[in-house]
Amino acid sequence: MLTREEIFVIYEAGPEAVISVIQRLENIIEEEQAVRIAELEERVKIVEARLNQNSQNSSKPPSTDVFCSEKPKPKSSRTISGKKAGGQKGHPGKTLEMVENPD
């Protein structure tokens, strides 16, 4: 940082000295910003790569898939037979009746 006295010396040197100092300060600021932007872009890439991982493309368990918008469809080998569910018509069936004194 420039002290008050240093700034006053530059001011007394004239407009060209002031312009020169301001341009040097702008260059330093631009270089620091470029370095900081590069660091932040690298961090964003790392975070995005981590967020794009799920149980399908990494060794993570499916229970950690919190940001998945849709779950994968089950891959069942069962085929539809067209029959109704349940027992056959006319079969009497058996039901265990309730008793007065259960054990």
Image (spheres, rainbow, N blue to C red):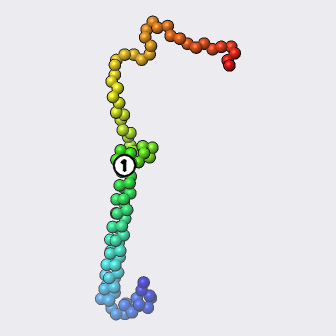
In the image, what residue occupies the spot 39% across and 48% down? 59
> Which picture quadrant has residue 5?
bottom left
- Farthest-out residue, front: 103
Q: Residues within 10 Å of mark 1 (few under 14, many from 20)?
A: few
Q: Position of residue 16 (x, y in %)?
A: 30, 88
Q: Three-letter amino acid code at disc 1?
A: Ser
Residue behind mark 1: 58
The C terminus - image quarter: top right
Decide which of 83, 70 is in the foreground and name it.
83
Does 6 appear above or below 29? Answer: below
| Front-lying residue, 53 or 7 | 53
Q: Secondary structure at mark 1?
A: loop
Q: Is residue 97 above or below residue 10?
A: above
Between 43 and 103, the one nearer to me in the picture: 103
Q: Position of residue 50 (x, y in %)?
A: 38, 54
Q: Is residue 67 visible?
A: no
Query: In which quadrant is the N terminus drawn?
Result: bottom left
Q: Which residue ends up furthest to the top in the rendered image?
A: 90
Task: Say which residue appears at 34% left-offset and 33% top-offset.
Answer: 75
**Residue at (37% x, 90% y) in the render:** 11
Residue 68 visible in the displayed image: yes
Outermost residue, right direction? Answer: 101
